[in-house]
Image (cartoon, rainbow, N blue to C red):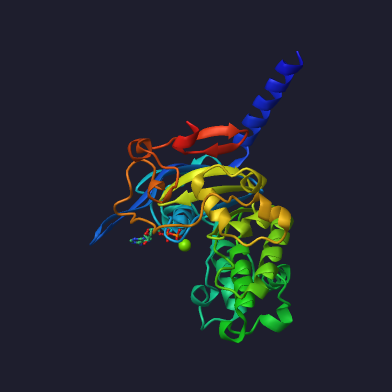
């Protein structure tokens, strides 16, 4: 009786989790035709982001993280696969998306220096999306809204409104970029390495601002970074990406207590730790070795096998599929099949 009840309840939670997904990515691919061949930047990935969730996407440089983010905001058109926003297919470039959907998904890039127009004041920068998406606002309303947004990100409007990006520090500029992303009242923001170009001393400030804003506006984040340790403080769930594919997805704590994929272990073994307990948890058996192969000619079977100390013949032949090892903890590795 009790078991039947628990099973029903688990079924309910699963259905609810599915229902609550704000964004779903289904078998998404993005190939680039280049003079040196077809780059399989994103090669058949699936995941979803729940409402209010921070979903971390982690992998070394070149694994396809930015391309994934750009597909979601509509900078690129997918080669195949689907992107669903609240169940609606948005697998088309942003300029073709319905206006009310375009404003829902925004992006903050890694380097505010290149993403902000140097000729515009902070006010102009934050006001632009209001002019595009909130046409009914009067000039005075828009100005009030710009002030509100600057205050929300911790930049006192009286000090910052009429300054130019070159007069601000990197962290301050990134806060301007965040205010601009917030202007259209989005539900999802893609954060593409939002602190990687900044001084370490400013990184925590930006992360804290992002966490506060998420609570205040019930935002969902796709938080992209090459730094798995950064996700520990922000992400609810994490997906590990390597050469265009996702190899492990789990709630954040699972990654640090029970990492399963050899690639995840490799990423973990190279991050600095603070305490002896953390040092004990660090996987010892895998050190970062080898070069990342080219996404033009990825290895057959499991793409990580050329760097994996546990690879067998099977790994060259069989492409691993996802197995749910514990609730919500998925891994694609031939060791676990
Ligand atoms: N516009 C493009 N044309 C050709 N190749 C690209 C383009 N954008 C990205 N790539 C290639 O796709 C792969 C994934 O890139 P990217 O998504 O930027 O990775 P990440 O953000 O994880 O570092 C890389 O090999 C990169 O060189
Ligand atoms: Mg990138």
Q: Residue at x 65, y 25 (%)?
A: 11
User: Is residue 78 shown above or below 36?
Assistant: above
User: Is residue 246 shown above or below 216?
Assistant: above
| Residue 267 placement (x, y as % from top left) | 54, 55
Is residue 10 shown left or right of residue 301? right
User: Is residue 135 shown above or below 222?
Assistant: below
Q: Residue at x 63, y 36 (%)?
A: 17
| Residue 76 placement (x, y as % from top left) | 40, 56
**Furthest residue to the bottom?**
167
Q: 265 and 40: which one is in front?
A: 265
**Furthest residue to the top?**
1
- Res 260 quadrant in image: top right
| Residue 202 placement (x, y as % from top left) | 66, 73
**Furthest residue to the front?**
285
| Quadrant of the rendering where the N terminus is positioned | top right
- Res 137 quadrant in image: bottom right
Q: 8 and 244: which one is in front?
A: 244
Q: Residue at x 57, y 66 (%)?
A: 194
Would residue 185 be visible to someone looking at this image?
A: no
Q: 315 and 150: which one is in front?
A: 315
């Amino acid at each position: 009786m009790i078991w039947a009840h628990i099973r029903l309840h688990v079924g309910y939670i699963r259905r609810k989790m599915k229902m609550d997904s704000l964004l779903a990515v289904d078998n998404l691919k993005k190939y680039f035709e280049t003079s040196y061949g077809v780059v399989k930047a994103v090669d058949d990935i699936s995941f979803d982001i729940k409402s209010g969730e921070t979903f971390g996407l982690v992998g070394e440089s070149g694994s396809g993280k930015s391309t994934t983010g750009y597909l979601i905001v509509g900078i690129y058109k997918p080669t195949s696969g689907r992107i669903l926003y609240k169940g609606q297919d948005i697998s088309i470039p942003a300029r073709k998306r319905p206006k009310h959907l375009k404003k829902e998904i925004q992006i903050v890039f890694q380097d505010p220096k290149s993403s902000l127009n140097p000729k515009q004041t902070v006010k102009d920068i934050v006001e632009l999306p209001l002019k595009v998406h909130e046409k009914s606002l009067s000039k005075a309303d828009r100005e009030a809204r710009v002030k509100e947004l600057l205050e929300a990100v911790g930049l006192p409007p009286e000090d910052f409104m009429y300054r130019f990006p070159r007069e601000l520090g990197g962290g301050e500029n990134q806060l301007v970029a965040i205010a601009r992303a917030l202007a259209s009242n989005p539900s999802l923001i893609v954060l593409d390495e939002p602190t990687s170009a900044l001084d370490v001393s400013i990184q925590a400030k930006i992360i804290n601002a992002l966490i506060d804003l998420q609570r205040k506006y019930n935002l969902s984040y796709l938080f992209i970074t090459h730094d798995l340790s950064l996700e520990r403080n922000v992400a609810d769930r994490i997906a590990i990406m390597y050469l265009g594919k996702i190899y492990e997805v789990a709630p954040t704590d699972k990654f640090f207590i029970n990492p399963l994929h050899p690639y995840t272990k490799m990423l973990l073994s190279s991050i600095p730790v603070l305490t002896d307990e953390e040092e004990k948890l660090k996987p010892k058996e895998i050190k970062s070795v080898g070069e990342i192969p080219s996404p033009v000619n990825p290895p057959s079977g499991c793409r990580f096998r050329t760097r994996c100390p546990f690879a067998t013949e099977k790994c060259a032949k069989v492409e691993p599929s996802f197995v749910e090892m514990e609730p919500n903890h998925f891994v694609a590795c031939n060791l676990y099949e």
